[in-house]
Amino acid sequence: MTNYIYPKFGYLRSKEQADGIVKRHPIVVIGAGPIGLTAALDCAARGQPVVVLDDNDTVSIGSRAVCYAKRPLEIWDRLDCAAPMVDRGVSWKVGKVFFRDQLSYQFDLLPEANHQWPAMINLQQYHLEEILVAKCRANPLIDLRWKHRLISLKQPGDHAILAVETPDGIFTMEAEWVIACDGANSDTRKMVGAEFTGQFFQDRFLIADVAMKADFPTERWFWFDPPFHPGQSVLLHRQADNIWRIDFQLGWGADADAEKQPERVIPRIRAMLGDDAQFALEWVSIYQFACRRIDNFRQGRVLFAGDAAHQVSPFGARGANTGVQDIDNLAWKLAMVLRGEAPEALLDSYHEERAYAADDNILNSTRATDFITPKTKVSRYFRDAVLELAQHHGFARPLVNSGRLSVPTPYATSALNTPDEDLVIGEMRPGTNAADAPIAIAGKPSWFLRCLGDGFTVVTFGNATDKTEIAIGPLAARIIRVGRDIEDPTGLLAARYGASSGTTYLFRPDQYVAARWSGFDEAKIIDAMLRATGQDSAQPGAGQKELAA
């Protein structure tokens, strides 16, 4: 068994409850899991005070979400959390897929070098939450309130009224905005009457966290129809502390209570590892899953994120990774609205962009589930043929689907994008998350993404301008000149952005490309900033008029 000791954070009575006053807060987050804690950190990083309510007083029990992808690590780096996560976790990038007892094919999630963060880390959710809680506790803008359970929510107009139950009774608080991060069974979602529709799958899976010392490589191993678990699938992952995560497919008719018992779990593990294997069970759970989402991520003053907004199958690690990217999209918009820098309508783009991403994740998860758990004999024959062919024929390998692993969804059709109007080469189109690259600042090595994320940023290559900032009303963007403010010693930055002298990019505060041009044009940049904040930039020459004024 692991020596992990679950911390107790402790309940404290708030001053507003003790004084019997009703206080209005700018932002209240419901749920202190990975998504809620990330929401608190991101909003605080943008200058907004946040109250977090959670009905528990410790971290999540069991490993739960275990795989965290490169993009969330980039987001957490912006919030000064990624390094301890990577140090504590297990980094990997190679996956292998087996059919029966033969290797069908393998893949590399990050085949190119010169990225700051690994393709994936494996880390038990309780370790990850401890890191996030420590960061929240160190931030004076974040008020973590444990043993605070939301029991009702009303929205009279320009705010929300929350009734909260604590060990000292029930009290009322108010919020300008609520971010609901209270999971798949979200009570907040039920309180606002939001629809949650999609497909629910009947297959049951067993998760076993096993403490053991093993010499398996740090890779993702997935078996279809292995000899030790015939007719089903198995997934193996290494975690921190010599804990191994094993997922066994059980099928439709499995008895969840019976299958969780050690006398049923241990023989399955022995069949996989051998009779002489030394191991101990740390945590066992049975799960079913769904692929579905909320009808609108914004419900009045309540904004939904993570599993409260969408659910996917665990194949592909698209759950928590997607939720972190929800927050990345939401926090800067909410901060700008609260500061009066953008209209409230900007928050509608949160639904537009993240529902688009959720639909993409649901599509990929549904396809993976259909491949892993075929519903007809014809589907199984097709799947098995693909797995056999993939051992020797490259054309079949893209058809193998053991879960397409989490990658960011480009906001290709977002209304916040300024469409390309001239020829800029490369894949970094508007709506795409920024690619990282090694750079140097005053001769010291650094990373490009660390230059982005505090607000709007203009990056221009060459000597296109002497300016260091562009402003329009309360909006402002820093200008970074490649070759003057930062150096591109390897040339990888220019290569990844298809840049030549004069190439100019506008990045949003979430490190996404808002617009790009072959040359520097201040009026066009202003128009693009207005569009990216949900303001009227549709009038021809709006930026020109502002400059003339």
Image (cartoon, rainbow, N blue to C red):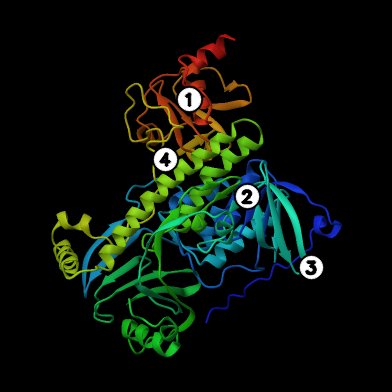
Distance from the alpha carbon under mark 4 to that under mark 1: 20 Å
Q: Does the residue at mark 3 contact the one at mark 1 (Cβ under 8 Å)?
A: no
Residue holding disc 3: 168
- Which amino acid does the dot numbered 2 rest on? Val
Q: Earlier in the sequence, mark 4 or mark 1?
A: 4
For discs 2 and 4, the disc positioned in front in the rendered view:
2
Residue holding disc 1: 528
For disc 4, the neighbor class at 10 Å (few under 14, some 14 to 19, many from 20) is some
Q: Position of residue 327 (x, y in %)?
A: 54, 48
- Which amino acid does the dot numbered 1 rest on? Ala
- Which amino acid does the dot numbered 4 rest on? Ala
Residue holding disc 4: 435
Is 542 placed left or right of 317 in the picture? right
Q: Is residue 518 something that shows in the picture?
A: yes
- Which amino acid does the dot numbered 3 rest on? Asp
Helix, strand, or loop for circle 3? loop
Helix, strand, or loop for circle 1? helix
Give residue 411's quadrant in the image. top left
Distance from the alpha carbon under mark 4 to that under mark 3: 49 Å
Is 476 placed left or right of 437 in the picture? right
Front residue of this view, candidates 173 and 495: 173
Helix, strand, or loop for circle 2? strand
Give residue 489's quadrant in the image. top left
Q: Quadrant of the C terminus?
A: top right
For discs 4 and 3, the disc positioned in front in the rendered view:
3
For disc 3, the neighbor class at 10 Å (few under 14, some 14 to 19, many from 20) is few
Give residue 389's quadrant in the image. bottom left
- The disc at residue 178 is 2
Across the whole image, how many numbered discs are drawn on residues?
Answer: 4
